[in-house]
Amino acid sequence: SKFLNDKWMIKNGFLNDVQEHKPWWWNIKVQKLNLSAPLILLPEVSCQKAIEILQEKGYDQAPVVAESGLILGMVTLSNTLTSVLAGNAQFSDPVTKVIYDQFSKIGLEDSLGKLSCILENDHFAIVVHKQMQFNGNGSSFMKQMVFGVVTAMDLLTFVSRNDKM
């Protein structure tokens, strides 16, 4: 059962670190990774335009975020190309037809240990930051902003550059 799986429990926020011999980087916060700002696509971007943008800007993937700030998923260059070539999507279709809507989110204050647990199963995690926003009548709400996309390579690069800080 997943409730007996410590890594699942950590990934989903039910347990803090249970690893006895944690690596030196385990409790460092995600914000220390110095991620670059992500390229974000709106849901109406066509598959063809998404491919062009990703190739031109040198990205493999990008979050798809509605104007409201709702994170809809991730689009990858390879999945978009594969879907179009297989006939499952047209170049003119909106990118929402080829997004991955199963993704993990992690906060800037979360630990690299939690990130490591997420990256054991997922190719990436979307780094989010919660922000309080106020509207004209003074009422407030929390909005999640996409801060970055982090991969296992980002974590590995950080660990190898800063080994034994």
Image (spheres, rainbow, N blue to C red):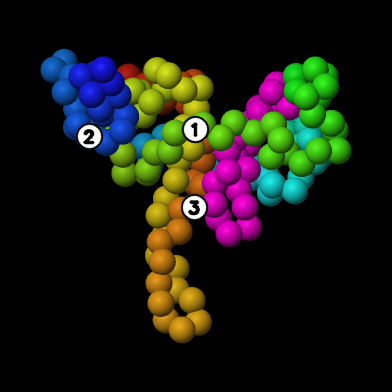
Report the side of 126 relative to 132 (left or right): right
Asked if the residue at tag 3 contacts the one at tag 1, i.e. Cβ–Cβ closer than 8 Å, the answer is: no
User: Label 3: few (<14), some or many (≥20) within 10 Å?
Assistant: some
Select label 1 or label 3 by which is in front.
1
Q: Residues within 10 Å of mark 1 (few under 14, many from 20)?
A: some
Front disc: 2 or 3: 2
Check disc 2 and report the residue beneath it: 14
In magenta, the rendered stretch is: 59-80
| Residue under label 3 | 145
- Disc 1 vs disc 2: Cβ atoms closer than 8 Å? no
Residue 92 at what x, y percent from top left? Answer: 86, 38
Residue at the (39%, 38%) spot, across then down: 106
Q: Is residue 77 located in the magenta-colored stretch of the structure?
A: yes
| Res. 109 image quadrant | top left
Query: Looking at the picture, how far across and down is residue 150, in whole percent?
Result: 48, 31
Residue at 25% over, 27% down: 9
Mark 1–mark 2 distance (CA, rounded to whole Å): 18 Å
Q: CA distance from mark 2 to mark 3?
A: 23 Å
Q: Amino acid at mark 2?
A: Phe
Q: Is residue 53 left or right of residue 68?
A: right
